[in-house]
Image: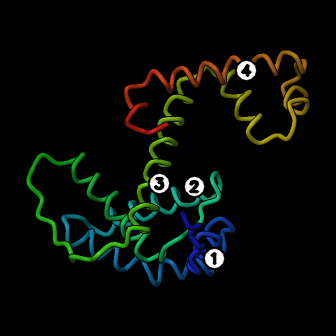
Amino acid sequence: MTEKKVHPDQLYIDGLVQNNSNVIREIYRKFVPKVKNYIRTNSGDDDQAQDVIQEVLITLFNQAKTNGLQLTCPFDAYFFLLCKRRWLNEIKKSSNKEVTLQDENVSIDESVQEMTFQTEVFDEKQSLFDEMFQKLGDKCKEVLQLSFVTKTMEEVAEKLNVTYGYVRKKKSLCTGQLTEMIQKSPRFKSVNY
């Protein structure tokens, strides 16, 4: 199997991660009008389009930050397909009525579909993690949040004014509790963990 090459459009993903305002402006200038037009043509308005765009950009940012997202297809096709699918899911969730979709029968490259699927799986996993994380007790949330952003457990113990042994054990217990909650969730199997 051949290794996929990183697409030159990786600059858009890198720009999002670096919060580069020039790159973000370029994304809005080059790619957002097509998404807005699609959503307006398919039972939506500009506010709904903006919400979808923001959600997709946040997902891309999180996936790039967490998993080092490497783009192997054009950003335009990838971004558009993510927004389109997010919009179709919104329509499905919020409507019992028939919806007429105007779809430009665009041929979608296999690489775009694969990347889109990976991003959607990432987003689902993140959503399940966040939902279960919110159900943890305050002390567990505090220990885990600090351990996510602090380099060592010694620093976490110092910040919480507890012993290293306590914070290590607490983190282990909380991680176990969170893992169990995620695995027992009805959404777990559908998320491909």
The percent coordinates of residue 53 (x first, y second) are 42, 65
Q: Amino acid at mark 1?
A: Ser
Q: Secondary structure at mark 1?
A: helix
> In the image, 122: left or right of 18?
left
In the picture shown, does residue 29 fall above or below 177? below
Q: Secondary structure at mark 2?
A: helix
Q: CA distance from mark 2 to mark 4?
A: 25 Å
Q: CA distance from mark 1 to mark 3?
A: 26 Å
Q: CA distance from mark 4 to mark 1?
A: 39 Å
Q: Secondary structure at mark 4?
A: helix
Question: Which residue is at the front of the view, 159 or 190?
Answer: 190
Q: Secondary structure at mark 3?
A: helix
Residue annotated with mark 2 = 63
Of pointers 3 and 2, the one earlier in the residue sequence: 2
Residue annotated with mark 3 = 118
Q: Residue at horizontal 56%, vertical 67%?
A: 2
Residue annotated with mark 1 = 21
Of pointers 4 and 3, the one earlier in the residue sequence: 3
Q: Amino acid at mark 2?
A: Gln
